[in-house]
Amino acid sequence: MAEPLPMLSLLETRVLGTLVEKQRTVPDTYPLSVNALLAGCNQKTSRNPVIEASESDVVQAIDVLKGLWLVNEISGSRVSRFEHRLEKILGIPTQASALLTVLMLRGPQTAGELRLNCERLYRFADISSVEAFLEELASREAGALVVELPRLPGSRENRWMHLLSGEPEIEAMLPAKSSQSANQEIEELKARVSALETELAEMRTRLTAIGA
């Protein structure tokens, strides 16, 4: 049964996403130790943003996720190992968890980017199947897990973002150049108006001279 939407920090989503990713890409080393999780959270590739968490940071994030039942500690080993319970707790299928994982690890992406970046976690047949699962995650009765963001200037596709860390601040996500472009357009319009006013004044002067 699906649980209410948790509110996670960047590092908590990074830990959770890393567990799902490594389960599917390197199953022989799964469940993961704290050291393996630390390396996965701090890796430079396939991560946005790139972070530099400490071991104590990761342990603290694990404790939070354990409290939400999203992570489980495996006993019977000399080294503590951890596994995720994302699909069971949130009540989502493998395809949806793959999309959610890539969004947690790489940030907002279009459906096309998600299909490409999900290759190692789940191979979607086409973009329409990606979009179908995104819509399912967005309309989930227990609470939306993703949201479609407004289209950026010059973009052909909308990006999607996960909601495990709460609602995004849309204005903060818009590029700074958009306001600069608006200011530039205003200045260009002012210049055109000024030129037209000058031209009109010259025409009046010539008409006055002709009339005289």
Image (spheres, helix red, strand yellow):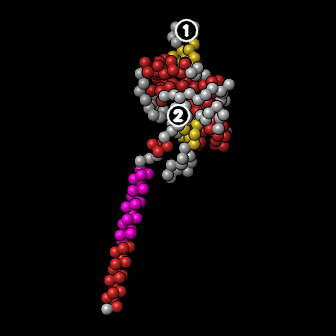
Give the quadrant of the N terminus. Answer: top right
Which mark is first along the chain, 1 or 2? 1
Q: Residue furthest bottom?
A: 212
**Residue 22 can be seen, yes or no:** no
Give the label on residue 77, or none. 1
Tell me: residue 196, above or below residue 178: below
**Mark in front: 2 vs 1:** 2
Q: Position of residue 167 (x, y in %)?
A: 53, 37
Membership of 194 in magenta stretch = yes
Q: Which residues are magenta?
A: 177-195
Quarter location, residue 92: top right
How far apart are the alpha carbons under marks 2 and 1? 36 Å
**Residue 149 can be seen, yes or no:** yes
Estimate how packed mark 2 is, as few (under 14), some (14 to 19) or many (20 or more) residues with alpha carbons within 10 Å.
Answer: some
Which residue does the image show at 59% across and 29% down from the upper left?
A: 5
Quarter location, residue 82: top right
Q: Amino acid at mark 1?
A: Ser
Give the quadrant of the C terminus. Answer: bottom left
Chief secondary structure of the magenta portion: helix
Which residue does the image show at 47% across and 35% down from the upper left?
A: 48
Q: Amino acid at mark 2?
A: Gly
Q: Regarding mark 2 in the picture, which secondary structure is present there? A: loop
Q: Nearer the viewer, residue 122 or 208?
A: 208
Quarter location, residue 93: top right
Q: Position of residue 35 (x, y in %)?
A: 47, 18
Q: Nearer the viewer, residue 170 or 26?
A: 170
* Residue at the disc numbered 2: 166
